[in-house]
Image (spheres, rainbow, N blue to C red):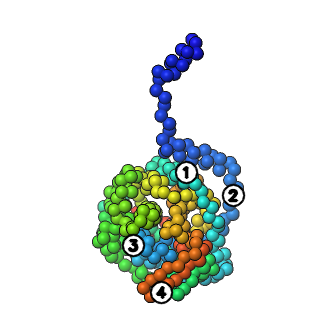
């Protein structure tokens, strides 16, 4: 066979299409995972106490959950707390590339889609227990800094599977009421039934969220979409695996979402932080386990000085100030409100 024969054969056959973005990201994730397993130095565990909702006064989605204020413990974390634990140290926030974030989100979707799952029965309740740490909403005339005292609370929330009832502790009193989202139809929805009805296609999910969020600019729409999708992961004790995977794939489609590989969660565990800078000054992060890609919590921190204005005056937040740090302590399905998994 001559070289001309080989050329003729090659030209007669279709060339294979290049790998898809998802396939490329999955392969990249597998390579990085193997490399990090061999070369990553251990990270010292710190006993950190890390809460979403604090600084961003106009935040959507997760605000509906804040009414479920459970046990509140106020600590001055100016050096060490009353138990001798050090004040949370927020490490640097090196920004990774968009491709890095997409790689991690595709891997998180793959892991979520493969996990075992038993949906709740009608009449059962989902339970989430989350610890939030935050300086709180700034008062008029106040200036919050990285040294501002942090307040810690634990929220215990029960949501009936049909989404029509929620239960929580308020000022130490156990309360059962109708959730706000059942009246407004806002996002993310309450309850397994409403969540499970969301689209399983990332583009369809993004389109649905876009209809629910207020915005004046494209950047604001993307900010609110990132916030809502993070809230959907954070507030639901159980999501169908395919839907959870869809949320991660939808996050991967939002512009300017980057990765911080050097993050830690509330307990000082190494974490992958998928983040977006909200409103140009607040970096909001979704924290994932480095090995399992499971949700660990959320974190936000001011990356620029910011001045906010209200009807009664203004307030300021300095660069480096913690917005909110959260960690999920427990989640599961129970038969009635007040029970824990």
Mark 1 and mark 4 in contact (Cβ < 8 Å)? no
The reply to whether dot 3 and dot 4 touch (C-beta < 8 Å) is: no
Mark in front: 3 vs 4: 4
Residue plotted at (61% across, 48% down): 32
Q: Would you place residue 173 above or below residue 6 in this image?
A: below
First along the sequence among labels 4 and 1: 1
- Mark 4 residue crowding within 10 angstroms, few (<14) / some (14–19) / many (20+): few
The residue at 50%/84% (across/down) is: 314
Q: Against 117, is 86 above or below?
A: below
Q: Gap between marks 3 and 2, in whole Å?
A: 38 Å
Identify the residue position indicated by label 2 in the image: 42
Question: Dot 3 corresponds to which residue?
Answer: 64
Query: Is disc 4 placed on a helix, strand or loop?
Result: strand
Front position among marks 1 and 3: 1
Q: Give the SS element for disc 2.
A: loop
Q: Which mark is residue 313?
A: 4
């Amino acid at each position: 066979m001559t070289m001309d024969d080989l050329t003729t054969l090659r030209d007669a056959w279709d060339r294979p299409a290049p790998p898809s973005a998802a396939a490329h990201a999955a392969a990249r994730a597998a390579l990085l995972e193997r490399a990090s397993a061999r070369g990553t130095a251990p990270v010292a565990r710190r006993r950190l106490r890390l809460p979403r909702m604090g600084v961003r006064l106009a935040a959507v989605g997760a605000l509906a959950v804040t009414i479920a204020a459970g046990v509140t413990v106020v600590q001055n974390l100016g050096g060490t707390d009353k138990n001798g634990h050090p004040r949370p140290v927020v490490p640097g926030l090196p920004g990774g590339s968009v491709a890095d974030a997409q790689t991690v989100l595709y891997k998180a979707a793959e892991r979520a889609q493969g996990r075992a799952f038993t949906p709740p029965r009608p009449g059962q309740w989902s339970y989430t227990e989350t610890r939030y740490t935050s300086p709180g909403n700034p008062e008029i005339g106040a200036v919050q800094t990285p040294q501002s005292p942090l307040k810690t609370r634990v929220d215990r929330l029960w949501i009936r599977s049909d989404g029509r009832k929620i239960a929580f502790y308020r000022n130490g009193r156990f309360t059962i009421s109708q959730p706000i989202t059942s009246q407004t139809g806002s996002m993310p929805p309450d309850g397994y039934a409403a969540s499970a009805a969301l689209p399983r296609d990332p583009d369809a999910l993004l389109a649905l969220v876009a209809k629910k969020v207020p915005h004046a600019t494209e950047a604001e729409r993307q900010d609110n979409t990132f916030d809502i999708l993070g809230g959907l992961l954070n507030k639901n004790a159980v999501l169908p695996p395919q839907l959870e995977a869809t949320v991660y794939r939808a996050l991967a489609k939002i512009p300017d979402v980057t990765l911080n590989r050097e993050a830690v969660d509330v307990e000082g565990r190494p974490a992958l932080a998928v983040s977006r800078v909200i409103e140009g000054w607040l970096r909001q992060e979704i924290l994932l386990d480095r090995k399992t890609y499971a949700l660990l919590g959320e974190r936000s921190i001011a990356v620029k000085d910011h001045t906010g204005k209200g009807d009664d005056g203004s307030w300021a937040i300095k660069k480096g100030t913690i917005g909110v740090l959260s960690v999920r302590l427990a989640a599961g399905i129970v038969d009635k409100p007040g029970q824990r998994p």
